[in-house]
Amino acid sequence: MNITTTIVPIFCIIVLGWLAFRKGFIQPEFIAPANRIVYYLAIPAMIFKVVAQTDFSANFHSRVTVVTWLSMGSIFLVSWWIGKLSRFRQGQLATFIQSGYHCNIGYMALAVAYYYLGNQGLARTGMLAAFLMLLQNLLSVGVLSFYSREGSVWKKWNRIGINIFGNPIILSAAVGMGFSLLHIPLPTVVHRSLDILGGFALPMALILIGASLSFRLIRRHLFAVLWTAGVVKLLLLPGLAYGAFRLLNIPRPDFLPAIILLASPTATVTYVMAREMGGDPDFAVAAISASTLLSAVTFSLWLTLAG
């Protein structure tokens, strides 16, 4: 496992996506449909295949899941406290809080897990990701609804709630766990089809991340995004979990997938949630962009400590 040969190629593809967008090879109208293909088809295919072929009982660790949940819940409260002290207006406060804990699992964490840990590590990361995504999405809906000034809050809760429990990554991991527990083999035709579709997931996801970066919005919200997306998201969240794992003497190979998940930058879905539920979409884009760029350094730090 080599950190340099994991992190550098990932960010080379992100930079390539940014350059392709700047030079007009990727048009703005291409990004949304491409994101849907990756998020709803390619990544679920990849997750289902690797989880279904992995021994669930040997690779799922309940203590790791509990510590991961508690760490995210604690940072949620810390982000809320910092945001209140900073006197943000309501919509921006909700997005500030969300940016401090909502992890980019589908696009960044899974890419790092795959290229650093291989298929088995990806399967373990995917299993844990299903539980983590459930919690972080529930927290995000809760805080955005609490601070929303727009009408029909309960309708938004219903719509976003359907998106949470119908989340393609959660569902694909859950179905894959079922196949694993029941020892259901995948037919060769299905296996190869999933190989083809899943192989498209990570490269396109990284290109789309690069195409979505906004340096203009980073400059506009520089101080705030450095706090929430830099200090809180990339340092405090994985740092709290790392300290707890070491205190409990949990073996490094068992908790490394959790560190990769928690150390990932702010999730791209924070922009969608901010737009749909009365948050601050511009601040969300700034936090996503800044944390993605900074994670090139912080991922190396956490992989060195935990790897």
Image (cartoon, grey):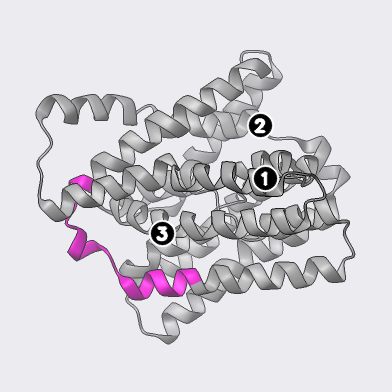
Q: Residue at horizontal 48%, vertical 69%?
A: 69
**Which amino acid, by three-letter code, is at mark 3?**
Phe
| Residue 44 colored in magenta in the image | no
**Which amino acid, by three-letter code, is at mark 2?**
Ser
Residue 17 drawn at (x, y percent): 59, 27
- Disc 2 + disc 3, Cβ < 8 Å: no
Q: Residue at horizontal 51%, vertical 64%?
A: 302
Label whose residue precedes the other's in the sequence (2 or 3):
3
Let me know if residue 54 appears in the view.
yes
Q: Which secondary structure dominates the residues rendered in magenta?
A: helix
Q: Residue at horizontal 72%, vertical 60%?
A: 97
Q: How far apart are the alpha carbons under marks 1 and 3? A: 22 Å
Location of residue 145 by image quarter: bottom right
Let me know if residue 263 appears in the view.
no
Residue 79 drawn at (x, y percent): 71, 67
Position of 285 with respect to 25 (left or right) is right
- Disc 1 + disc 2, Cβ < 8 Å: yes
Dot 2 corresponds to which residue? 212
**Which amino acid, by three-letter code, is at mark 1?**
Ile
| Residue 53 colored in magenta in the image | yes
Dot 1 corresponds to which residue? 288
Dot 3 corresponds to which residue? 131
Is label 2 in a helix, a strand or a loop? loop
**Vertical relation: 236 (above or below) 103:** below
